[in-house]
Image (cartoon, rainbow, N blue to C red):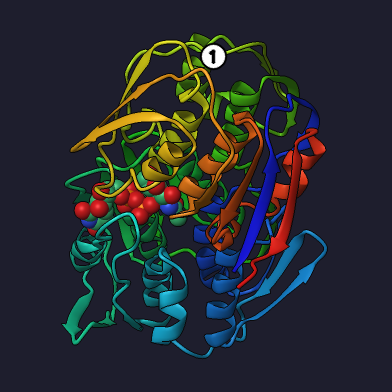
Amino acid sequence: MSEILIQGGVSLEGEVCVQGAKNSVLPILAATILAGGEVLLEGCPHLRDVDASVDILRGLGCRVRWEGDALLADTASMTGCAISDALMRRMRSSAIFLGAVLARCGRAEMSYPGGCELGPRPIDLHLAGLRDLGAQIREEGGFLHCSAARLTGREIVLALPSVGATENLMLAACGAQGVTVISNAAREPEIVDLQEFLNACGADVAGAGSSAVVIRGGRKLHGCRYRCMSDRIVAATYLCAACAAGGDIFLRRAREEHLATVTASLRQAGCAITSDTAGIACRCIGRPRAVRPVRTAPYPGFPTDAQAILMAALVRSEGTTVFEENIFENRYRHVDELIRMGADIRVSGRTAVVTGVEHLSGAAVRCTDLRGGAALCVAALAAEGESRLFETGHIERGYEDIVRDLGALGARITGAEERN
Ligand code: UD1
């Protein structure tokens, strides 16, 4: 495990180019299975979860290699339809391969992706939707045995707008005969990106970004060249870092239309934010102000993935901010670590009340999960003195190089191997 050292109290200045979106790249890598040819995925971030997806594809017999910041995936040679337990466990969202493997092979074998540090990670909606399309799924000793001689399009109504279930079913439906309508679909920008990728491969998918996604299945797909969208949560992280530490930064490739609820809160906190097609500029001077209640919700609501990060920016605010986490059960694990730095936060059930303090002090803190770890970086930038973050491997699941990016913005930050 590695660690990160941050000398706080330095305001940020400069420009970084925001990496490609993890949550786009992962379903798109699963979708390459349907293309059955060569896909060049440009602007692909080098991340642990991307490596895990690459290993899953290789395990299925596909040829995948990096070419600079692009991944070249040739899935024509795919032979397998089973994913090993060890590979399934390496990535929380490995279930996304189910729909694509089933559509391509008529069969899929994989272990059940267990819970994660955010609490249980059920896939009941994925499985119910696949059954609606005609798949037979047997669950046995933590393993899923799926088969479908033929998948048939139909209307699927999701009980809640799950991002992963919407994506999984879009992939399966591309291999189904006839029209599938996914109602109460998730509306996240990454789902629009997946639609655009599939259509670039010759699929007929429409409606992504709305609550009804329509897939006309059964087309023969082909390879393509595609550049995925920029990562809105990474952009949110660096905007929150500027809010916390003060500064004047520009995030190239960041798209404000994907981040409207986050930028609305940051404006309430006192940041001056402007944006155009090139990116987002953010200027923040002095102590942030508390903001109106932040309630996480499916897109276009406030993203659960930005909850910890905004909280970290507001621990030094003037006033009190209420957070309500409505997506995952166990998403306040960063709070105890922020308290070690001097934050005043009270958690009760799904609510956290943050009373701003004037000073934070650098401390030794432990990253509890991906976004919780990023939140500690944000708080450490605003703290006086040095902070030492442990178990930063979590951060590498979603940030290509947070030390490089924050360093480019003028932060005093270094990475090191953890000492025993
Ligand atoms: C995706 C994102 C993750 C983000 C989350 C919510 C990826 C790779 N990950 O995760 O970063 O935090 O969206 O924006 O894109 N649920 C069920 N049954 C299911 C599926 C989900 O009950 O079959 C519940 C979950 O427990 C959770 C809620 O639905 O409470 C939302 O989950 P979902 O939208 O599916 O999140 P993921 O796709 O796992």
Location of residue 263 in the rendering, given as x and y in whole percent from the top left corner? 53, 20
Identify the residue at horizontal 47%, vertical 29% (top origin).
310
Q: Is mark 1 within 8 Å of ligand 1?
A: no
Q: Is residue 78 visible?
A: no
* Residue pictured at 63% horizontal, 30% vertical: 384
Q: Determine the secondary structure under disc 1.
A: loop
Figure label count: 1
Q: Residue furthest bottom?
A: 79
Quarter of image, res 301? top left
Please name the amino acid that badge 1 sits on: Pro
In which quadrant of the rendered image does the C terminus lie? bottom right
Is residue 413 positioned above or below 68 on the image? above
Q: Looking at this view, is 240 or 278 the one in front?
A: 240
Name the residue located 75 percent from the left edge and 51 percent from the top edge: 414
Residue 87 at x, y = what percent? 47, 81
Left or right side of 414 for 116: left
Q: Nearer the viewer, residue 260 or 358?
A: 358
Q: Is residue 199 above or below residue 98?
A: above
Compared with 301, 70 (above or below) is below
Quarter in which the N terminus is drawn? bottom right
Return the residue nearer the eye: 120 or 299. 120
User: Taking 163 as reference, is 232 left or right?
Assistant: right
On the question of residue 269 being in view, the answer is: yes
Front residue of 147/256: it is 256
Left or right position of 108 against 37: left
- Rendered location of residue 58, percent (x, y): 59, 83
Position above or below: 156 against 60: above
- How crowded is the residue under tag 1: few (<14 C-alpha within 10 Å), some, or many (20+)? many
Residue 163: image location, x then y, percent? 36, 48
Q: Which residue is mark 1?
A: 288
Residue in the image at 26% along x and 66% along y: 152
Residue 100: image quadrant is: bottom left
